[in-house]
Image (tube, rainbow, N blue to C red):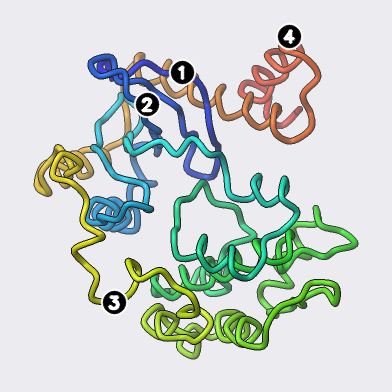
Amino acid sequence: MERYEILKDIGSGNFGVAKLVKDKLTNELYAVKYIERGKKIDEHVQREIMNHRSLKHPNIIRFKEVFLTPTHLAIVMEYAAGGELFERICNAGRFSEDESSVLHSQPKSTVGTPAYIAPEVLLRKEYDGKLADVWSCGVTLYVMLVGAYPFEDPEDPRNFRKTLTRILSVQYSIPYYVRVSKECKLLLSQIFVADPSKRITIEEIKKHPWFLKDLPIEYMEGEDASLQMKEENEPTQSIDEVLAIIQEAKKPGEGPKALVCALNVLYDECYFTLCHEGQSQNYDDDHSLAMKMIFFPMVV
């Protein structure tokens, strides 16, 4: 970690925190995602990292490297300074179908939320990651079109249990005041299918009339040359090096230094939550409450 200077927290989720860092050698900015060492480093995490490493597209966040801290596996990736897509939607209200189509074909996102999770994942069944991702892409498309999550109860959007129930029962609708074409409605109905074996696949989406409409030629099948990244953007670590670091990360962190690092990350998570969930009052209050959340979680 000596190579990177931590600047600030930029996200928080079930995995831990994401931080903005600066490379001390080049002054370039990167995002670093921290996943706690031990049980959380499973085959899904390994597959996600290896798949990310293999992606080469100008509009997909670029993987750089992985490294270990005493308590966490750190994934270094390109920093997208434009903020979260949902924040952009909140500022814009919602996007037109044409804008949504372009953005939907240029994925550059983000730390997850339960609102995007497919039913089979919620039910903790064995699942196909690609088909689960199709569902999540459908949620993203809906949010861009409507400006709200598809499965939240409009009357009670903060009720997590209601959201889960509506996801499992595939209960959603498009408001009457939002103009959406028949082709787009059909695509959403083919994405939001509880049984993943009956859900539309990525290959089928790429041939869907709505997706192909006005799609820039560089995103068409067969235009591989235009999608290749420059050689200097290739990952700096070999596949074997990345796999070796992931294997080592499956061992829990140990020792006093690991405890200090774990408490620092836990504090960051608590403080970030307070600042971004409406509980923030001022720095002193947030600092005090964050410490209480760590050492007296049952009381807080």
Which comes before the other along the chain, label 3 or label 2? 2
Q: Is residue 54 left or right of residue 212?
A: left
Sequence-earlier tag: 1 or 2: 1
| Residue 45 numbered tag | none
Mark 3 — residue?
A: 221
Q: Nearer the viewer, residue 110 or 210?
A: 210
Q: Quadrant of the C terminus?
A: top right
Q: Nearer the viewer, mark 4 or mark 2?
A: 2
Of circles 3 and 2, the one toward us is 3
Residue under the image location 73 percent in, 73 percent down: 166
Callout in the foreground (3, 4): 3
Q: Disc 4 vs disc 1: which is toward the camera?
A: 1
- The answer for how far apart the CA atoms under marks 4 and 1 are is 20 Å
- The residue sitting at 53% across, 45% down in the picture is 14
Q: Earlier in the sequence, mark 1 or mark 3?
A: 1
* Three-letter residue code for mark 1: Leu
